[in-house]
Image: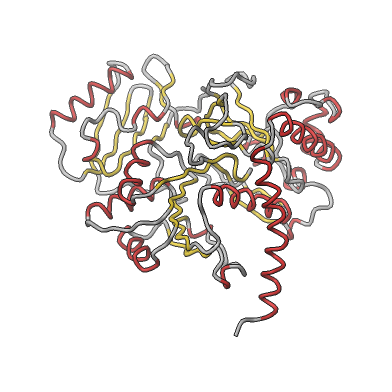
Amino acid sequence: MRDPVAMGQASEMILNTIPDLLRSRKNLYLDRSVLEEMQIKKLGRLLKYAYDNVPFYHTKLKDAGISPDDVRTIDDLRKIPLTTKKELQRTPLNQIVAKGINVDACVRSRTSGSTGLPLETLSSRKADSHDAVMWDRAFFRNGMRLRDKMVVIRDPRNFQKKSLLEHFGIMRKKYVSIFDEAKTQAGIIARERPDIIESYPSSLEILANYFQSKNLSTKPRLIFTLAEFLDKRSRELSETVFETELFDYYGSSEIGLMSWECKGHDGYHINADNIIMEFVDASNETIASEEQGEIVCTNLNNYAMPLIRYMQGDIGAKVEGQCSCGIRLPLMHIIGGRKDDFLVTTNGRIIPPTVFFPYPFENFRNIEQFRVIQESIKKLRIQIVVKWDFSSEALEKARKEIRRVFGEEMEVEFEFLEKLARDPNGKIRKVVSKLRQRRV
């Protein structure tokens, strides 16, 4: 017998969420000028609140000699100094959380910490609920249905409790640890027969290789990837093995869902009704469309711990034009990896990590996994997990190709492993630079 109290709570949750979801779906088709007007209004309210209630931003704006009234357009936002993760890490919590906020009532999130110390961020329940709507909006737009069953492969520290809606067969999720062997994950997928698989790209690639090597078959209707850079090779492998379309999502624990792919695959739609996204160069100056720069975001809804002009550490570029799908949100490209995972040639030229997907190996289908580690300005170490042996001739040819791009003085070392070690957060970065962080 179903619990009438639980049914009432589930109904209330649906009634509270559906209007927000419906409103947000209408925003997908607003004119750019209307979207920008919405952003400016939200930004004005946020800045005034942060100036009056958040000591960190009060000081930041005051030291820059500006007040909230000085920011009247999106372009005016550049007057405000950027906010870095390191700044927030060394600032006491009571300086970055708004006055009067009950931190115990907030939703806490932690960054993965893969490139340094993790950062804990707080958001109000209202802001967290709105971010969940942003994810649902993108999922539903890409074909998710209320009765779908989803297998979610992620860090077990990020597993979520079963929601009230799931008790009634709505938006069901089965969580699987990213640290489980592929054999275990495949067994769960075979048993659950999910409509959707959600995973990190690196974990999905391992799973796809396992299914392929064992001649196994499963056909989810959709695949969603997130939390890591998705390269072309991983996408093609996953779509081929699972025989379905893959959609990638770009988000962070600090900001939430920032942009996402649709069926047009013309780029990633920026959630401009929820955030302001900028792209800046090494001098922290805003750059033109199609030029690559560091991604800077302002969340327009979280008043508990505002993040204004927060440097994401990722590299991207704004795309001109409109997507073929009809959605009018602005578009962006993700260039690949974090700024500290870009590589450097022997003469100091910056190389994006995408150069290794799948270059320089001709027979890349023989590769199950690989990782490129830049040990120094003159040494690259390439870890490889192969399905069968590489010939010495193939390795030498790859070495020559790498030196052609990185310089003849570059030492290239190949290391063959049975499997790549995961980062503590369960992810597998494909490119790691041990050089001092450099801006592109």
Colouring style: secondary structure
Numbered disc total:
0
Residue at 66%, 69% in the rendered image: 10
* Image coords of residue 359 (percent x, y): 29, 29
* Image coords of residue 252 (percent x, y): 57, 44
Farthest residue, direction bottom: 1
Residue at 64%, 21% in the rendered image: 286
Residue 191: quarter of image: bottom left
Q: Nearer the viewer, residue 153 or 8?
A: 8
Relative to 59, residue 91 above or below: below
Residue at 68%, 55% in the rendered image: 129
* Image coords of residue 59 (percent x, y): 80, 33
Relative to 229, residue 138 above or below: below
Residue at 65%, 49% in the rendered image: 131
Q: Nearer the viewer, residue 28 or 164?
A: 28
Q: Nearer the viewer, residue 276 or 92?
A: 276
Q: Is residue 363 left or right of residue 167?
A: left
Q: Is residue 399 left or right of residue 106?
A: left
* Image coords of residue 177 (percent x, y): 43, 60
Q: Is residue 273 left or right of residue 258?
A: right
Q: Is residue 129 left or right of residue 268?
A: right
If the image is split into quadrants, where does the N terminus sit? bottom right
Residue 347: quarter of image: top left
